[in-house]
Image (cartoon, grey):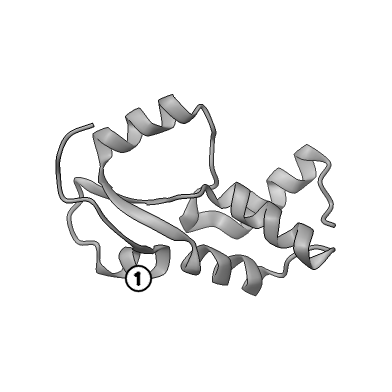
Amino acid sequence: MSDNKYRGGSYGELRSSLTDPALVVVPLPPLLVTLHQLEKEKGFSLTEQEVLSARDRNPALIMDVEDWKQLVEQRRLDDLDPDDVWAEWQAYRLTSGDNGG
């Protein structure tokens, strides 16, 4: 990965300040991991507001788009689209058979 302007913070904070289209905000850990853990701790399904709040609080990095693509290939782990996290979380739970708790 190239040496560039990586910066960390919460997803919500970084996303609201991003203006360069060559950069992307990457949730680390992946949102799937974070939401699974929160739902396990809660013991039943997260609400839409809880999912959106978790996304915004999730640690993240600003990365070059090309470096992000390399990271996705290396991790071999698809993640939820942060911009459509509620719908994708619901679809994931349905297809994975994970009904919370």
- Name the amino acid type tagged 1: Glu
Quadrant, the N terminus: top left
Between 47 and 72, the one lying in front of the other is: 72
Q: Is residue 70 above or below residue 20?
A: above
Residue 65 coordinates in the image, percent (x, y): 26, 40
Q: Residue at 75% across / 47% down in the picture?
A: 93
Q: Quadrant of residue 59?
A: bottom left
Q: Is residue 82 above or below residue 65?
A: below
From the viewer's perspective, is 36 left or right of 25? right
State the residue position of label 1: 13
From the viewer's perspective, is 76 left or right of 88? left
Q: Residue at 69% across / 55% down in the picture?
A: 37
Residue 25 coordinates in the image, percent (x, y): 34, 53
Number of numbered discs on residues: 1
Query: Residue farthest to the left?
Result: 4
Q: Residue at 14% across / 44% down in the picture?
A: 4
Element at label 1: helix
Crowd band around label 1 with a 10 angstrom C-alpha radius: few (<14), some (14–19), many (20+)? some
Residue 35 coordinates in the image, percent (x, y): 65, 56
Q: Residue at 17% across / 55% down in the picture?
A: 20
Between 19 and 68, the one lying in front of the other is: 68
Quadrant, the C terminus: bottom right
Residue 40 coordinates in the image, percent (x, y): 78, 57
Between 57 and 80, the one lying in front of the other is: 57
Q: Quadrant of residue 8?
A: bottom left
